[in-house]
């Protein structure tokens, strides 16, 4: 019986959190591994971005969380994405392929030849970064700048522009602007540039509208993102939407084995 219990414990620790999905949770599920939290150290953010963090549940509450999971319908069908928040390890699972980041390299496992089309390294954290706004804008190495108020769809929004110090991530030339309601400080729009694989900044801005915010473990997360067509670097009309389901955000610490490169996987190149 003792050996049986040990085996079950090991199996439980190796699962990704797609096995503990609930749409909205208010308390953490049973921990997969005992968390060893470090004391929260408040950073001296500019007032406007600090107010945005506070409106969405506070950076302190976000910092308590250790893993984020959700399901989305991507270009290749349903995807389950699991993210270890402290070290940004990632695992994306579909029927035909899986992509992961184990802290050192991005890997790709294809269950069928040429099942995955695209750049796995670029894709591995693409939707996480959009989805985890605004909190990912509290990372180290970020430069903040207040931008002029702007109107979208007849509403006035304040904006905070974000750029990165040299050498931060795969795309340090990327830029973002968070547009937020001046009364509630809730973000409503995200403007972004894409510079992956380039050495210079881009002057072409994309736009995403954030909708259907829900409370998950004390943090506000969106259930729907809508990409817009643009003209003269302004959003014009909705182009496509993506909805997120089975969202969990917990203090549970996932075993590193969840993100290990499996047998048969290849290393994704930049």
Image (cartoon, rainbow, N blue to C red):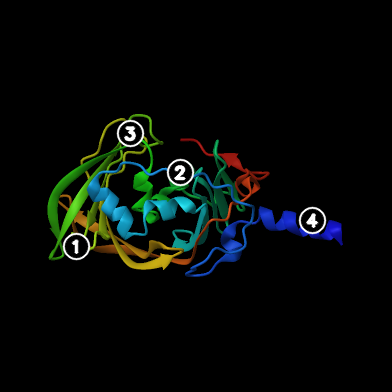
Residue 95 seen by the camera: no
Neighbour class for label 1 at 10 Å: few (<14), some, many (≥20)?
A: few
Neighbour class for label 2 at 10 Å: few (<14), some, many (≥20)?
A: few
What whole-number distance in Å separates the C-alpha atoms at marks 2 and 4?
39 Å
Q: Position of residue 102 (x, y in %)?
A: 57, 42
Q: Position of residue 104 (x, y in %)?
A: 55, 35
- At mark 1, the secondary structure is loop
Query: Can you say whether 187 is above or below 255 in the image?
Result: below
What whole-number distance in Å separates the C-alpha atoms at marks 1 and 2?
40 Å
- Among the two numbered marks 3 and 1 on one chain, the one whose residue lies closer to the N terminus: 1
| Horizontal side of residue 132 vs 234, given as left or right | right
What whole-number distance in Å separates the C-alpha atoms at marks 4 and 3?
50 Å
- Among the two numbered marks 1 and 2 on one chain, the one whose residue lies closer to the N terminus: 2
Q: Position of residue 140 (x, y in %)?
A: 38, 38
Labelled pair 2, 4 in contact (Cβ < 8 Å): no
Q: Which mark is residue 198?
A: 3
Q: Marks 1 and 2: which is nearer the front? A: 1
User: Is the N terminus in the top left, top right, bottom left or bottom right quadrant?
Assistant: bottom right
Labelled pair 4, 1 in contact (Cβ < 8 Å): no
Q: Which residue is mark 1?
A: 183
Residue 192 seen by the camera: yes
Q: Residue at x 58, y 59 (%)?
A: 17
Q: Nearer the viewer, residue 99 or 62?
A: 62
Labelled pair 2, 3 in contact (Cβ < 8 Å): no
Q: Residue at x 33, y 33 (%)?
A: 198
What whole-number distance in Å separates the C-alpha atoms at marks 2 and 3?
15 Å
């Amino acid at each position: 019986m003792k050996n049986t219990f040990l085996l079950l414990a090991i199996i439980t620790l190796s699962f990704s959190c797609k096995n503990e999905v609930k749409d909205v949770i208010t308390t953490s599920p049973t921990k997969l591994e005992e968390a060893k939290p470090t004391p929260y150290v408040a950073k001296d953010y500019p007032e406007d971005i600090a107010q945005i963090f506070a409106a969405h549940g506070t950076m302190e509450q976000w910092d308590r969380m250790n893993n984020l999971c959700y399901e989305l319908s991507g270009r290749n069908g349903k995807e389950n994405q699991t993210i270890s928040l402290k070290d940004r390890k990632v695992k994306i699972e579909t029927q035909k392929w899986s992509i992961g980041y184990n802290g050192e390299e991005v890997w790709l496992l294809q269950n069928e030849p040429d099942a995955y089309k695209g750049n796995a390294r670029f894709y591995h954290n693409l939707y996480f970064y959009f989805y985890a706004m605004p909190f990912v804008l509290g990372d180290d190495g970020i430069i903040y700048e207040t931008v002029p108020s702007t109107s979208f769809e007849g509403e006035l929004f304040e904006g905070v522009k974000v750029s990165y110090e040299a050498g931060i991530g795969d795309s340090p030339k990327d830029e973002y602007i968070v547009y937020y309601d001046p009364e509630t400080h809730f973000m409503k729009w995200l403007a972004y540039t894409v510079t992956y694989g380039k050495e210079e900044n881009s002057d072409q801005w994309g736009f995403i509208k954030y909708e259907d915010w829900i409370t998950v473990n004390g943090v506000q997360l969106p259930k729907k993102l809508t990409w817009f067509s643009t003209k003269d670097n302004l959003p014009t009309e909705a182009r496509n939407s993506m909805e997120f389901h089975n969202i969990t955000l917990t203090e549970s610490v996932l075993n590193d084995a969840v993100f290990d490169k499996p047998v048969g996987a290849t290393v994704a190149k930049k």
